[in-house]
Amino acid sequence: MHTLSIAFSAVTLSFLAYHFYLQSASFQKIVQSYHDPDRSKVATIVVQRMLGFFLFGITPLLIAVFLFDKPLVYYGFTGANYSKSLCWIALLSAIVILLNYINAPKKDNLAMYPQIRITTWKPNILIISTLTWIAYLAAYEFMFRGFLLFALYDALGLTAAIVINTSIYSLVHVPKGAKEAIGAIPLGIVLCYLTLITGNIVVAFVVHVVMALSNEWFSLRANPAIKIIIK
């Protein structure tokens, strides 16, 4: 329970720090320091994601290494069940891509995605967005499906771990609206269960990256106001 208390406290403080910083005057100064509106919009999202990478990834990683008594492999840093993981990744990725393809042209989706709200996307913006998505989601999945989930599982068992983890996962999606908060419930249950039965966070991480990137790319394609310049 000592480990679980630390994990809960770390996750809570990380999310508070993340959201309060994004509302702070110092963050607004960064955003306003760019005279070019497009550069400002790109910087806003890049700073958000890299802040998430640090708070959701590096912070719990340091806690797990220096305060917890189990090795990192216990928290999902392992290649165990590689073939089983690949099968689940293929199946879930196919489902996610299909759903995103159907959902991308809808008004509520285009109102939120892509997150970088500029009208002209060049290759450098696509690369920056892709890399920062991957970094952010690596941290996000380690915190939820590694650091917190395994601490819950160790203290409370499988069912309680999945229920509590998924509940928190759903709640942090509330600012994005009811659709994402409710949708996070079945996704959270599936990803938690697969993480626990495989012993690694690979499935959760890859599927989440596929979901984010396919949604962004389909949204770019579906938005008539956005122009993509390949050259």
Image (cartoon, rainbow, N blue to C red):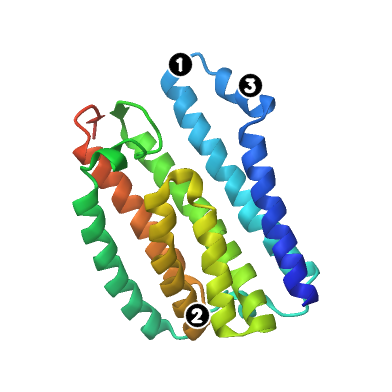
In the image, what residue type sits under mark 3? Lys
Element type at mark 2: loop
- Which quadrant is home to the C terminus? top left
Left or right side of 66 for 158: left
Element type at mark 3: helix
Q: Which mark is residue 77?
A: none
Q: Would you place residue 67 above or below residue 119 in this image?
A: below
Q: Residues within 10 Å of mark 3 (few under 14, many from 20)?
A: few
Pointer 3 or 2: first along the chain: 3
Image x and y of residue 141, in percent: 53, 63
In the image, what residue type sits under mark 2? Gly
Q: Which residue is located at x 55 percent, y 39 percent?
A: 48
Image x and y of residue 225, in percent: 23, 27
Image x and y of residue 125, in percent: 38, 35
Left or right side of 226 for 28: right
Q: Which residue is mark 1?
A: 36
Residue at the extreme top: 35
Left or right side of 89 for 4: right
Q: Which residue is mark 3?
A: 29
Element type at mark 1: loop
